[in-house]
Image: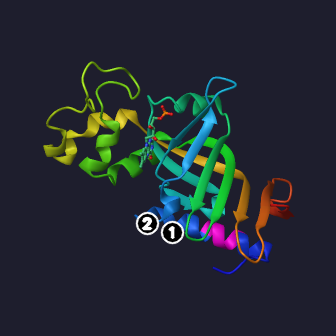
Amino acid sequence: MEVFDDLAAIQDFSWQQLQQAPHQRKHPWRTPALASLEEAPTVGIRTVVLRRAIPTDRVLRFFTDGRSGKMKAVAAGHPLSWLFYHPQKEIQLRIVGWPQVLPPAAADEVWSQLSVAGRSAYAATAAPGSSSSLPSDSLPPDFFSRPLNQTEAARANFRVIDTVVHSLEFLQLHRQGHRRARFSWDADQAGWVGEWLVP
Ligand SMILES: Cc1cc2nc3c(=O)[nH]c(=O)nc-3n(C[C@H](O)[C@H](O)[C@H](O)COP(=O)(O)O)c2cc1C
């Protein structure tokens, strides 16, 4: 891959890749790490599936179980930090933004598109992270053989979380010279302000 020498090209490339990643099973940016403040000064970090990137709204979306630990940070409105790494291109993105829980009616619409397998991630009868005397996913035993309309109870656990991005930092390692750039959202100007940083 060529070395980046243009800030606008970096912005375009980053959002383009983020848009593509959810639709490409092997794209390394499909499964980023998401970090949030846990119990200060501890940070919680976990893998999530990037479900959607919406450049015009500056949004990155993931799905989760409303009973999961990360929801505390979301409910408190603490910023979320995303880490993406592309090993072939040697490009890292670090993205920070504010969480927004998608309103129920909009989440219903997303839910209606999910298959039984997709819904299973939200269907555990015990809360994620609770202790279990046996190795178990806590799913009702017949869950995967149910018709879609008998999986509605899991809707109560399903949450769609958007991150409204305010900072995107790009790092490229390259033989011709490393490149680091940061883009910050300027609310007054309603636009991104980009600058080069020393890698
Ligand atoms: C490949 C992979 C993808 C995952 N995707 C998600 C996801 O999209 N949403 C989610 O809440 N957890 C996802 N998880 C599970 C989380 O990493 C984490 O274990 C779980 O959400 C509990 O995290 P928490 O206690 O910090 O809330 C995924 C795990 C793996 C290994």
Kindly identify which residue carries mark 1. Answer: 20
The amino acid at mark 1 is Gln
Q: Quadrant of the C terminus?
A: bottom right
Q: Position of residue 67 (x, y in %)?
A: 44, 28
Circle 2 residues within 10 Å: few <14, some 14–19, many ≥20: few
Q: Secondary structure at mark 2?
A: helix
Kindly identify which residue carries mark 2. Answer: 23
Please give the range of residues in magenta: 11-15
Q: Position of residue 142 (x, y in %)?
A: 14, 37
- Indicate how the structure is coloured in the image: rainbow
Q: Is residue 13 magenta?
A: yes
Q: Secondary structure at mark 1?
A: helix
Q: Is residue 47 magenta?
A: no
Drawn side of residue 172 relative to residue 118, left or right: right
Q: Position of residue 180 (x, y in %)?
A: 78, 63
Picture layout, residue 28 above or below residue 134? below
Q: Quadrant of residue 56?
A: bottom right
The amino acid at mark 2 is His
Q: Position of residue 76 (x, y in %)?
A: 63, 28
Q: Quadrant of residue 92?
A: bottom right
Q: Residue at x 43, y 66 (%)?
A: 23
**Between marks 2 and 1, how big is the CA–CA gap?**
6 Å
